[in-house]
Image: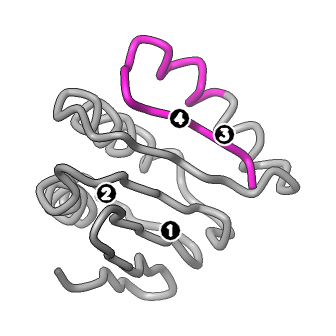
Amino acid sequence: MDPLEIDDFSIRIEESTDEFKIFWKGKCRLKDPQKNLSPFLEEVVQNSKDKILIVDFTDLSFTTSSTFPTLLKFMRNCSEQKIETKFIYDGTSRWQEVTFHSLNQVKRNLNHIEILPK
């Protein structure tokens, strides 16, 4: 699977026998995340079955609110596929703290999902 690179935003991939890690970096200013991001995240789900999925946002410096519906869909998909998923965010970043606190409230109904500060 190839990494995703769009302007000053990227998602890097690391894979081992028991983990599939993706690292978000830069500024996610996608005007249509459903078009640009969803196919990539669907491929991540397919490639991470039978593994622990780590989604690391600590190097993400900005994202638009239009990314959240796509991210929520990704979380639901991971839960439905019973993929143990850990979303890691930068606990020292105010905007990440607020964002992931909100996502943590939404994910209460989703199994196999953890949201953790780094």
Answer with left or right where residue 100 lies relative to residue 83: right
Answer with left or right where residue 59 lies relative to residue 73: right
The residue drawn where x is 77% and y is 49% is 95
- Which residue type carries mark 3? Thr
The residue lying toward the viewer, choosing from 47 and 34, is: 47
Q: Quadrant of the N terminus?
A: bottom left
The residue drawn where x is 63% and y is 27% is 102
N-term-proximal mark, 3 vs 2: 2
User: How far from the left and from the top, in percent, is residue 44?
Assistant: 22, 61
Q: Which residue corresponds to mark 4?
A: 114
Q: Quadrant of residue 116?
A: top right
Is the residue under label 3 in contact with that under label 4 (CB below 8 Å)? no
Q: Which residue corresponds to mark 1?
A: 28
N-term-proximal mark, 2 vs 4: 2
Q: Which residue corresponds to mark 2?
A: 33
N-term-proximal mark, 1 vs 4: 1
Local packing at callout 1 (Cα closer than 10 Å; few below 14, some 14-19, many 20+) is many
